[in-house]
Amino acid sequence: MSGTITKVSGPLVVATGLADANVSDVVRVGSQRLIGEILQMKGDSASIQVYEETSGLGPGAAVETTGTPLSVELGPGLLTNIYDGIQRPLTEIRDATGDTIARGVEVPSLNRKKVWEFTAVAKAGDTVQPGDVLGTVQETNAIVHKIMVPPGVSGVIGSISGGRYTVEEAVAVVKDPKGGEHPVTMIQRWPVRVARPYKHKYMPSRPMNSGQRVIDTLFPIAKGGTAAVPGPFGSGKTVVQHQLAKWSDVDIVVYIGCGERGNEMTDVLMEFPELKDPRSGESLMQRTVLIANTSDMPVAAREASIYTGITIAEYFRDMGYDVAVLADSTSRWAEALREMSGRLEEMPGEEGYPAYLASRLAQYYERAGVVECLGSDSRQGSITAIGAVSPPGGDTSEPVSQSTMRIVKVFWGLDSSLAYARHFPAINWLTSYSLYVDTLKDWYDSQFPGFMALRDKAMAILQEEESLNEIVKLVGRDSLSAADQMTLETAKMLREDFLQQNAFMDEDAYSSYDKQFRLLGLIIRYDELCRDAMAKGADLNALFAIPARERIGRAKMILPGTYETEYGEIEKQMRKQIADLTAGGEDQ
């Protein structure tokens, strides 16, 4: 069915003669067949957002509807790939058209010529239901891709055989109870705005190890949880996202560069292929899908990129994998919503954002979680959704930040003053919070008894430091009691020796839970031993000057595999030196 353009307003096109079209249908616009999606229908008039540059397009041009909603292709070949916001493979487009991407180019999302080795795990005669695994493909050295029965198909397998296939060739045939035959290929298509089905959703109960001490110890996020990373320009949002993508203990990473600067996305594209995955030793790209929709690309495609990313994540979740979706940033996505809403002449809400901003954000974050996947084998998968927020001027009272904070359960508030002081990650421990602390307590207690007690003690010291700093500004540090000066010293150790990390040093870029537990234990025990020694008359300055104090400061640089022994030696030395001061110390 085709219509005619009557109005062009930037990425918004209005066309008539589309009475039989539906909202969310994908259309092809003009002679260049630009990709668009119908946002509104009024009679036979359709308002269309076009995902490509509309310059040169004018009234009278033809619009052709495909009759299908905006969908993604799911199958082998997703990993290691780089897509734009509507899942066009950028590498293949560059190979076909050169470095400058032509408008209206049509390239399939998954390579139709590449042959994959399919290994059947089901057999003819088996009764299958949606989600059952028919076979596997070794997509990368790190990830086994499971070929599943698509939703809506069930019955008995009529035929299935292993071998070498392209994604379009049928690997099995399923006969339904009515006698109909359904060829099953390795490719599935799914509308991006519709969440993929599952059996049951569970409360998250396992933490996601990010390797960042301020996150894992103070403000943990659960696998299947949601988090926001708000902060002003230059505070390190993108760096935090990069660190999470590199080190998080998830099986798959989907990184969405949504409206951010092109040079930041370039850093990702250049770094990730060279980084070694700590889990497999292979390139990090082997378990990563990148969606690049930078600020210089069409604004309407930003709105789609978030849904494209979360749908790809749901597909891998359905295989039983733990997936992390990193969106950088949802503010740029919200700005795209605001622009399209303005062009549609909708009634604006706060600061010009559409009234449905909060519900759209909720629809995105609600697709995260831990679920029991479809299928008869009771496998579980999870999606952890982490979105960066870029409030203008760092003001988190603006609508995107406030709407996000009402939805997510972890808030990592970045502080520009910490960033300017070269304290990274620049997560402010006084404004951040995690609502998963109580949920994850059982896991921490079972794996690292005493971890949560150390964490609570550290938080109390950092909060007390803030109160003491107000007094210090008025009367100076020397007027404080010895106990309060000890609090300030311990807080300084926590900030500089524990919370601060150097992403450019291999020894410090990543910390396991075990290392975090031991390092935090060293600092807290130093505090406890010093307080005990002061009660027995030891000199405070002498306690601050013991040689073990310097070793504690360097302890975070100890290599994995040796820190268990070295931390034990540091603690032994620390205990002896403090005991010596207590026994015959300088106060006597």
Image (cartoon, grey):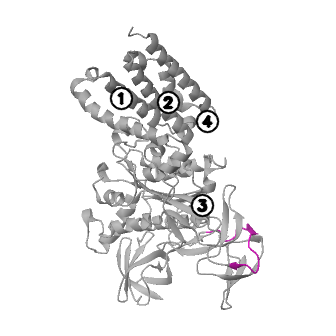
Gap between marks 2 and 4, in whole Å?
16 Å
| Prevalent SS, magenta region | loop
Whichever of labels 2 and 3 marks the residue nearer the N terminus, that label is 3
> Which residue is identified by label 2?
522
Mark 1 and mark 4 lie on one chain; the one further toward the N terminus is 1
Circle on res. 560? 4
Disc 2/disc 1 C-alpha distance (Å): 15 Å
* Residue at position x 41%, y 37% in the image: 458
Q: Which residue is mark 1?
A: 487
How packed mark 1 is, by other alpha carbons closer than 10 Å (few <14, some 14-19, many 20 or more), is many
The type of residue carrying mark 2 is Leu
Identify the mark nearer the N-term, 3 or 4: 3
Label 2: state its secondary structure.
helix
Which residue bears the numbered disc 3? 321
Q: Residue at x 44, y 76 (%)?
A: 37
Q: Quadrant of residue 11?
A: bottom left
